[in-house]
Amino acid sequence: MKLLVVGSVALDSIITPFGEVTDALGGSAVYFSTAASLLTPVQVVGVVGDDYPLAELKKLAARGVDISGIETAKGESFRWKGKYSFDLSSRETLETRLGVFANFSPKIPASFSDAPFVLLGNIHPELQLSVLNQMKSPKLVACDTMNYWIDSAKDKLMDVLKRVNLLIINDEEIRQLSGDWNVHRAAKWVLARGPQRVVVKRGEHGALLVEKDRSFYCPAFPLDEVFDPTGAGDSFAGGFLGYVARTGDTSDNGLRRAMVYGAAMGSFAVSKFGVDGFDGVTLKVIQDRVSRFKDLTHFDVAEALA
Amino acid sequence: MKLLVVGSVALDSIITPFGEVTDALGGSAVYFSTAASLLTPVQVVGVVGDDYPLAELKKLAARGVDISGIETAKGESFRWKGKYSFDLSSRETLETRLGVFANFSPKIPASFSDAPFVLLGNIHPELQLSVLNQMKSPKLVACDTMNYWIDSAKDKLMDVLKRVNLLIINDEEIRQLSGDWNVHRAAKWVLARGPQRVVVKRGEHGALLVEKDRSFYCPAFPLDEVFDPTGAGDSFAGGFLGYVARTGDTSDNGLRRAMVYGAAMGSFAVSKFGVDGFDGVTLKVIQDRVSRFKDLTHFDVAEALA
């Protein structure tokens, strides 16, 4: 089933201890749709400037992503430049130039408006509401956000939360949003304000799915080599919602499996610069990794201790 | 089967955002043996000063811990005073007074020397070697250490590693020991230097069991309330080795179960000051928590994706 994402399409310049890259295909919608397209048809709504290298977007199309909802506006594309610390544990933003993204106003093509699964990417909550108003009757809507919107548009963000099924957010952001440093309490704070489920992304420590009476924890895949953490969280979200859209399964157990598919996609994303980590990744490769997650986390039922 | 621990018996003064306590029963051997004694008979070797409140030690004995190996030396007991940050994510040591612990030279009573399972607690590597030399033929020896010994006695510590089956260590320490910030590579560095297995404790993010070709990840139990993180890692080790000693099972799968028992004990430890979190914890309570770990981490095998 179709999956729609609205978010940023950018050009990233990244410096890691292992090398650097300039103006590579990036942005949350790009990572998300690259990962999700391995599992389900994806439609992207976004904007690029008239300086965007269209050959790069065609790579996305070659993955089966419908990019007809990416408009080209007069002006400069969204550019981000960042540098990671020696151990990849932190990064510094060296430059953010919003360009045409500053005036982005998502228009959902008619052929996209019946998508049953939707990710409202990390854009102004006002725009997330506008996207919601343009959709017919989605089966599951997830949203992302960031510290900037929590600071500057919290009221609107709370309006969005009332209308979505799932919030996907990282641990720092949910602490900021809820005002509670305990992520488990913070997730319950969110559950009381609209969404039925919350996914808390914790970087190298994995991700947590919190429902009213049940939680599921999926670690990050143990990797001896991490090359570039950029886009890991967006790739996680792409794998997660891609699996949900592919199976149509929104049950507890279906979403647990979706978490593992998300974590698998995150592990591919960090293995190379940009979205190159997905090169050569097939369904079989994905399922092999999912099996390895099972071996990583499962244990026999404990026998009764006499 | 019997489990021997050699480590610190201290008096802790702890300040958390929720209250404070002065001269409470503490030290790594105390947390370890309190947790382990819920699963198996434990013998402790340590030292206290002549100012130690013996009634406190009797509480340990009441749990079934054999404290006859704790000697009383002339002088002051080991005291530690620490203060946690508002979110418990970091702590500051306000005072460390080693007292009689500075001259500790562990003497293993004859009746303890045949213990099949041993934890060499966080003491000078030279003393860890001395304990090893006093043991008959233990089935499994684990050791702990800390940044101080990695800095000041690394050669001796490497000698210890050659003679133990398992290293239990936290993520910062294994990074320091190996010189590698990637904990998975760091664990493999250790595996190449003696131990067959490494357990990396990652605080609120859980713990990782690394073997040559297989890893197991156990998250920390999701708690809405954490009261005092002191001793969580030692309680984890106590649950882990307590389970191994109780079952005698040192197989891959046995150690996975042991990890979960360790994580359960860590979750009890942090719920109150000192070892009070273990009050009222029975085998049934422990096994209920272990079952909840299963629900927290297990997912159905993914069906084949057509």
Image (cartoon, coloured by chain):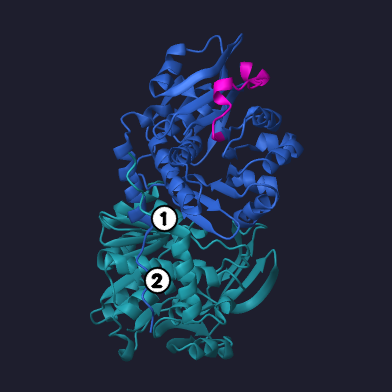
Chain colours: A blue, B cyan
**Above or below, A116 relative to A186:** above
- Residue holding disc 1: B299
Tags 2 and 1 both on a single chain: yes
- Left or right relative to B264: residue B136: left
Q: Please report the residue visible at 72 percent of the width from the left and 41 percent of the height from the top.
A: A158
Q: Position of residue B170 (x, y in %)?
A: 44, 59
Look at label 1 and name its amino acid: Phe
Residue stretch rendered in magenta on the structure: A100-118
Q: Please report the residue visible at 32 percent of the width from the left and 78 percent of the height from the top.
A: B247
Q: Please report the residue visible at 63 percent of the width from the left and 22 percent of the height from the top.
A: A106
Q: Please report the residue visible at 52 percent of the width from the left and 28 percent of the height from the top.
A: A29
Q: Secondary structure at mark 1?
A: loop
Which image quarter is the N terminus of chain B in? bottom left
Q: Earlier in the sequence, mark 2 or mark 1?
A: 2
Q: Report the disc number at residue B172.
A: none
Q: What chain letter is assigned to the residue under label 1?
A: B
Look at label 2 and name its amino acid: Phe
Of the pair A285 and A227, the residue shown nearer to us = A285
Eye-nearest disc, 2 or 1: 1
Residue at the far left in the pictured view: B137
Of the pair B58 and B269, the residue shown nearer to us = B269
Q: CA distance from mark 2 to mark 1?
A: 24 Å
Residue A115 visible within the image: yes
Q: Secondary structure at mark 2?
A: helix
Which image quarter is the C terminus of chain B in? top left
Q: Position of residue B14 (x, y in %)?
A: 63, 70
Q: What chain letter is assigned to the residue under label 2?
A: B
Q: Position of residue B43 (x, y in %)?
A: 39, 85
- Residue holding disc 2: B240
* Quarter of the view holding residue A283: top left
Q: Position of residue A280 (x, y in %)?
A: 30, 30
Q: Is residue B243 magenta?
A: no
